[in-house]
Image: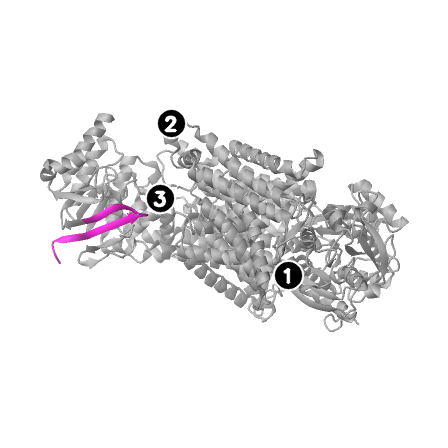
């Protein structure tokens, strides 16, 4: 079984990278929310599904094409996130993280349940906007999958630059560590926190729109991904954005390799990696340990 | 001692709330249960709409049996065996004579054992596992609508008939997937075909491009999807991107009208579904479908449609026996032929398998479809003896 | 000890025991057995999250693992129930020891994640193994006679047996919480670094607590295997770990009776919300949502807080309740 | 056994390229009260954590009572008789004052592992616990919860808990930080009282406290020991004046 042709290996690696693009986008959103707000966002999977459904509803009732939904749906999901943060999550900032986690978890439950009650469980199709592909010699690469990687990379790198390298980003980081200090400089900290949550959630929505043409749009499309993406963030180092992005792509590739060697383990291998990483590097590969 | 008073108050509350749950026993209706997924991932396969179909049957039967009014209790097992079996146990102990539908195999197998224990009847509608009439067969259980074997037969034979003699399987890494692949392989090899490879995926996988790529490079003429329905439709959708069809045929073994609708005809066209029912196959089936749609807003699938016949047949047998003793009623059900709007002269095998002809349906091209629910054309009918695997006395002692 | 000298919390537990004795005359025993098993499971979990402050996310491993072990012993090896239960508990304790030793050095969210990861790996093993029956699970587990002689196939007999075992286990938890060992655990929860500076090997205490909690969760799982005569993959799935967290939360983390109430609420929701069909999940979510926002201490925690406030007002000099088990909320 | 209960040699601690403690050496004489002072950010707290083993030094050597403890665990050092307090008062909020002290008293016994014994089995320790509470003037509030008492009394409770372990070396991390003036004098008296039975090393900001209590003083700046001596020696050292006192004057001028 191990005499696998090189074309197959290349193909699997590339496919892994493509899947990694989704992981990276989702885990980036999660890492932003955790890194800057210290909130473990368990609604992330449902917000991912919400993004896909937003695109679907936009095309069905307003005839907004994919390209419009790509911008609008994340904004809509982001606004939901902002409202949720402003109205509810905010009240729990001075409690233990467990309660924030449980609140987002129940938000996820409500979102998924409502989508299922309204749209059923079997899923709804969403048309592929980029039909066709090119033959790379070792595999056939659909245009749409290529597009996913490009968008994901662009968004990931852009977000990382803004938060890690720009002045706005340094305010953000400072805001969450020393809100009192920033307030004296006249910067509105609660608004920044809200916008950060909105941005993280918007990224989940964006991933949802991008997933819509590949997967069936279904209420449970995010719940499988949720704990996998959590694992990605932990491996990368909670709060490390670069770590989340790299670990996302790396996991995609690792899954690809597992599919070659022992396919049934492909969705479990990540947890083995996570245990190993946490035992050796307690704060994740790129994390700084905060006690 | 305020806290002590609190604890006593607490106790009173507990006891009072217990009393609230206590059942008042007035006139005893004849109770049958509809146990299925009413809210979760499988709700579209059966769900609350099936309860409606069962109500039709009760109404058409006259609302009474053995002089008692018939009551249908609906319950949600949330796809969790402990919830499902717990509920079933409670129903049986509370006087429910028969449970219909169920779904998820792990729940069904739990109830199969329970029904035998309690000597009650259970009639499976949306459950697929052929084990119900195989190694887990029971004199108290009837497998009514279809099973995993029948589900696959149409797609496999149709592909074989069109020259698909080399196969590659994408199989879910579960006993269910194994069985499906094993059954399909038997049919393929009997027809002179060959299985040249397979790959297994975990049940929580979402991306199948890697498996599809392997299947593509294997050069097999047919890619068989021996997997659960949700995954199957996802694979079909993803196969579009990689341009797998028309070079290779995709044989989706477990699929239903809801899934075809979910995929959309553009993607689904040409797929084969083996089903006991299609709403547009005869005047009688159309009449039932209209009635169903008026009530629920959608067309029935085979589970929902066949639930009607299952309840009707069961009630007939109860009336004929004159009691709800499960062994006697089920023996009676096996005695009399099944006849309703969708099943003609159906029989029940000793192992509990309902034998009925199955329809081979093919998803239409988008341009051929004239309406929302105009999804299939009927290709042919598979006679009952070919639609189901023969009974195997070596695994089920009931089979003769 | 005179009965009126008992703590209020132990009195509440006695009241619950009394209610347990009467309950089968009012409520269906099958439901009650399930309730008892989950109440014990949640209490065992509460021992860890409420009294040590460890938010483990993989307790289904012990519950389901012991369930499988007990089911297998009863069905495939034909052992008697008491031996099967014992083996289940030992199996769960061993799993707990391994998971505890592996994860205990990590703190906060990392601890949660490593327990989740180990639980996912255990789930994978269960799904692959032939012993567990894969996705079909172990069905038709026999209710063999206890000690080879006592018939437990009768629902009511089995119910009282389970009630007795669960009550004994609850007493073990109660005793543990109030023992010198329990004080050490609370010390770790309140201020781990201070405990280290007092010379306590906190990791060792945490591992012992983890193992104890795992063993008790295993006992709950073993009993469930006999009560339901069925074990499936759901029992080791992460959603079951999540469910037990919700039970502890809704009832009140760190309270003696909270987990029992929490188990009751969640199982009742599952059993009695059916009328809402498609909206069940949404309603469940909304209930959890409101609980977290409005009744963060959980039902028992909030009730206790109210009484404590009244008490503080009426008897400010009387301080003899300050050692009450029922801690209001968790200190950070 | 020599005169020094604790000897630290060339302790170094680096955090990601930044050197918080740089070759600090320190010897604490048995029976003395030794103070470690220095301006903000001089590395006092890091130094303190290194000695108590809550941090592991990048290099250097620590000897306590003639035993090398460079790589020991913090709990193990505590059991050897070196007990620390914390900057932010470290009490067990959900327990009574009596239980707080008892938790320390029961540590050397076999009780901690006995999960099957009732709480009443600890009654034997109550007498000693009350003595200790009495020592710090808290005997009257023994049954109050630790979360219910004032900040100053929490510090006193913490000292009672620490003394309960009968330490040979007591390490106090800013024992008067965050306290009102009225609370400081009782704490000074308390520290003097307990120093009869053990050696004390304290990190302290309040120079009045340092002047009043300490036998010897080490001054730390930028991770290095600048000088060591009595209060009189140190306070007249010009280097200390510029590095430490000078800065305090500046701060005061700004503030």
> Looking at the image, is C228 positioned above or below residue A148?
below
Residue located beneath label 1 in the image: B214
The range drawn in magenta is D1-24
Residue D23 on the magenta segment: yes
Tag nearer the camera, 2 or 3 = 2
Mark 1 near mark 3, Cβ–Cβ under 8 Å? no
Expressed as whole percent of the image width and height from the top left, the position of residue A118 reads 69, 40
Q: Which chain carries label 1?
A: B
The colour scheme applied to this rendered structure is: one colour
Residue located beneath label 3 in the image: D95
Residue located beneath label 2 in the image: A185
Expressed as whole percent of the image width and height from the top left, the position of residue B129 reads 71, 61
**Quick check: can you spot residue D127?**
no
Q: Write the residue at 43% across / 54% down.
A: A278
Kindly report the distance in space between the C-alpha atoms of the residues bearing marks 1 and 3.
63 Å
SS at badge 2: loop
Expressed as whole percent of the image width and height from the top left, the position of residue A287 reads 41, 48
Q: Which chain carries label 2?
A: A
């Amino acid at each position: 079984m191990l005499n696998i042709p090189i074309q197959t290996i290349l193909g699997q690696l590339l496919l892994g990278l493509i899947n990694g693009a989704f992981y990276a986008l989702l885990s980036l959103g999660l890492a932003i929310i955790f890194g800057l707000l210290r909130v473990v966002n368990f609604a992330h999977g449902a917000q991912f599904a919400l993004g896909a459904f937003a695109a679907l509803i936009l095309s069905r009732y307003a005839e907004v094409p994919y390209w419009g939904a790509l911008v609008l749906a994340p904004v809509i999901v982001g606004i939901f996130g902002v409202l949720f943060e402003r109205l509810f999550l905010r009240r729990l900032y001075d409690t233990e993280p467990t309660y924030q986690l449980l609140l987002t978890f129940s938000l996820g439950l409500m979102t998924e349940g409502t989508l299922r009650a309204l749209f059923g469980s079997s899923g709804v199709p969403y048309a592929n906007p980029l039909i066709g592909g090119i033959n790379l010699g070792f595999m056939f690469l659909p245009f749409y999958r290529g597009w996913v990687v490009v968008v994901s990379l662009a968004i990931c790198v852009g977000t990382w630059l803004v938060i890690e390298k720009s002045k706005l980003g340094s305010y953000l980081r400072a805001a969450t560590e020393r809100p009192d200090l920033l307030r004296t400089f006249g910067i509105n900290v609660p608004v920044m926190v809200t916008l950060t949550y909105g941005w993280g959630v918007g990224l989940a929505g964006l991933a949802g729109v991008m997933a819509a043409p590949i997967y069936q749009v279904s209420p449970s499309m995010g719940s499988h991904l949720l704990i996998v993406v959590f694992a990605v963030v932990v491996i990368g180092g909670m709060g490390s954005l670069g770590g989340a992005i790299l670990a996302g792509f790396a996991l995609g590739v690792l899954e690809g390799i597992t599919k070659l060697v022992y396919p049934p383990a492909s969705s479990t291998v990540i947890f083995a990696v996570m245990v190993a990483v946490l035992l050796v590097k307690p704060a994740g590969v790129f994390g700084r340990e905060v006690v | 001692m305020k806290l002590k008073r609190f604890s006593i108050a607490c106790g009173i509350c507990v006891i009072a709330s217990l009393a609230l749950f206590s059942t008042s026993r007035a006139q005893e209706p004849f109770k049958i249960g509809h146990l299925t997924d009413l809210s979760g991932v499988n709700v579209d396969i059966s769900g609350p709409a099936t309860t409606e179909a069962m109500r039709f049957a009760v109404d058409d039967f006259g609302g009474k049996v053995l002089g008692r009014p018939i009551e249908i209790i609906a319950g949600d097992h949330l796809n969790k065996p402990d919830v499902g079996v717990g509920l079933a146990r409670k129903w049986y102990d509370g006087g429910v004579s028969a449970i219909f539908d169920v779904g998820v195999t792990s729940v069904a197998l739990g109830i199969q054992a329970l029904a035998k224990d309690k000597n009650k009847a259970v009639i499976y509608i949306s459950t697929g596992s052929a084990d119900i009439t195989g190694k887990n067969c029971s004199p108290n259980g009837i497998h009514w609508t279809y099973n995993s074997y029948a589900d696959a037969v149409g797609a496999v034979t149709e592909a074989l008939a069109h020259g698909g003699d080399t196969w590659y399987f994408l199989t879910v890494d579960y006993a269910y997937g194994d069985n499906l692949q094993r059954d399909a392989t038997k049919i393929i090899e009997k027809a002179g075909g060959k299985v040249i490879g397979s790959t297994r995926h975990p049940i929580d996988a979402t991306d199948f491009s890697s498996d599809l790529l392997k299947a593509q490079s294997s050069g097999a003429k047919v890619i068989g999807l021996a997997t659960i329905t949700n995954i199957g439709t996802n694979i079909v959708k993803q196969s579009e991107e990689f341009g797998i069809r028309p070079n290779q045929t995709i044989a989706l073994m477990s699929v239903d009208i809801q899934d075809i609708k979910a995929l959309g005809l553009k993607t689904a066209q040409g797929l084969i579904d083996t089903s006991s029912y299609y709403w547009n196959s005869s005047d009688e089936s159309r009449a039932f479908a209209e009635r169903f749609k008026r009530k629920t807003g959608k067309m029935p699938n085979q589970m929902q449609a066949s639930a009607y016949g299952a309840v009707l047949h069961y009630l007939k047998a109860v009336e004929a026996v004159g009691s709800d003793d499960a062994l006697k009623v089920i023996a009676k059900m096996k005695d009399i032929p099944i006849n309703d709007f969708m099943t003609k002269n159906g029989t029940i095998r000793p192992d509990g398998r309902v034998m009925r002809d199955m329809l081979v349906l093919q998803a239409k091209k988008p341009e051929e479809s004239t309406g929302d629910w105009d999804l299939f054309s009927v290709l042919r009918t598979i006679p009952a003896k070919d639609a189901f695997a023969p009974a195997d006395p070596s695994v089920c002692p009931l089979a003769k | 000890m005179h009965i009126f000298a008992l703590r209020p919390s132990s009195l509440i537990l006695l009241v619950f025991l009394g209610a347990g004795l009467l309950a089968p005359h009012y409520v269906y025993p099958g439901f009650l057995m399930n309730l008892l098993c989950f109440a014990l499971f949640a209490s065992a979990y509460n021992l860890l999250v409420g009294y040590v402050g460890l938010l483990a996310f993989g307790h289904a491993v012990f519950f389901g693992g012991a369930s499988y072990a007990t089911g297998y012993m009863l069905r495939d090896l034909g052992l008697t129930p008491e031996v099967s239960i014992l083996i289940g508990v030992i199996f769960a304790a061993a799993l707990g020891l391994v998971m505890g030793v592996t994860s205990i050095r990590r703190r906060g969210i990392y601890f949660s994640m490593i327990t989740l990861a180990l639980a996912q790996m255990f789930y994978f093993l269960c799904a692959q193994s032939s012993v567990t029956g894969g996705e079909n699970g172990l069905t038709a587990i026999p209710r063999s006679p206890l000690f080879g002689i006592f018939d437990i196939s009768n629902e009511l007999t089995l119910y009282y047996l389970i009630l007795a075992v669960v009550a004994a286990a609850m007493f073990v938890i109660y005793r543990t919480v109030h023992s010198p060992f329990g004080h050490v655990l609370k010390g770790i929860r309140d201020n781990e670094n201070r405990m280290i500076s007092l010379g306590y090997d906190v990791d060792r205490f945490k591992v012992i607590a983890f193992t104890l909690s795992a063993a008790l969760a295993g006992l709950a799982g073993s009993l469930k295997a006999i009560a339901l005569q069925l074990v499936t993959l759901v029992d080791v799935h992460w959603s079951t770990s999540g469910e037990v967290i919700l039970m502890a939360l809704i009832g009140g983390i760190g309270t003696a009776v909270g987990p029992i109430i929490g188990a009751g609420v969640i199982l009742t929701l599952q059993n009695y919300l059916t009328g809402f069909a498609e909206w069940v999940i949404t309603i469940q979510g909304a209930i959890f949502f409101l609980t977290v926002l409005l009744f963060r201490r959980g039902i028992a925690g909030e009730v206790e807080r109210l009484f404590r406030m009244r008490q503080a007002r009426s008897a400010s000099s009387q301080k003899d309740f300050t050692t009450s088990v029922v801690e209001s909320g968790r200190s950070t | 056994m020599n005169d020094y209960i604790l000897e630290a040699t060339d302790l170094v601690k680096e955090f990601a390229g930044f050197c918080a403690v740089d070759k600090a050496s320190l010897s604490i004489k048995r029976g003395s009260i030794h103070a470690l002072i220095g301006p903000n950010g001089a590395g006092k707290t890091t130094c303190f954590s290194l000695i108590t083993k809550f941090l592991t030094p990048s290099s250097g050597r620590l000897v306590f009572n003639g035993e090398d403890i460079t790589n020991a665990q913090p709990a193990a050092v505590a059991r050897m008789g070196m007990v620390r307090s914390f900057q932010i008062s470290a009490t067990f909020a959900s327990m009574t004052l009596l239980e707080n002290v008892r938790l320390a008293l029961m540590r050397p016994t076999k009780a901690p592992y006995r999960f099957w014994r009732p709480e009443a089995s600890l009654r034997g320790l109550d007498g000693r616990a009350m003595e200790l509470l009495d020592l710090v003037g808290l005997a009257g509030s023994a049954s109050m919860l630790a979360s219910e008492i004032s900040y100053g009394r929490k510090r006193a409770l913490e000292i009672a808990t620490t003394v309960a372990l009968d330490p040979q070396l007591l390490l106090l991390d800013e024992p008067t930080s965050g306290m009102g003036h009225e609370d400081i004098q009782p704490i000074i008296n308390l520290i003097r009282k307990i120093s009869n039975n053990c050696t004390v090393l304290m990190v302290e900001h309040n120079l009045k406290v340092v002047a009043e209590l300490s036998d010897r003083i080490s001054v730390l700046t930028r991770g290095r020991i600048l000088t060591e001596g009595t209060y009189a020696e140190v306070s007249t050292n010009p280097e200390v004046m510029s590095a430490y006192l000078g800065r305090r004057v500046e701060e005061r001028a700004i503030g």
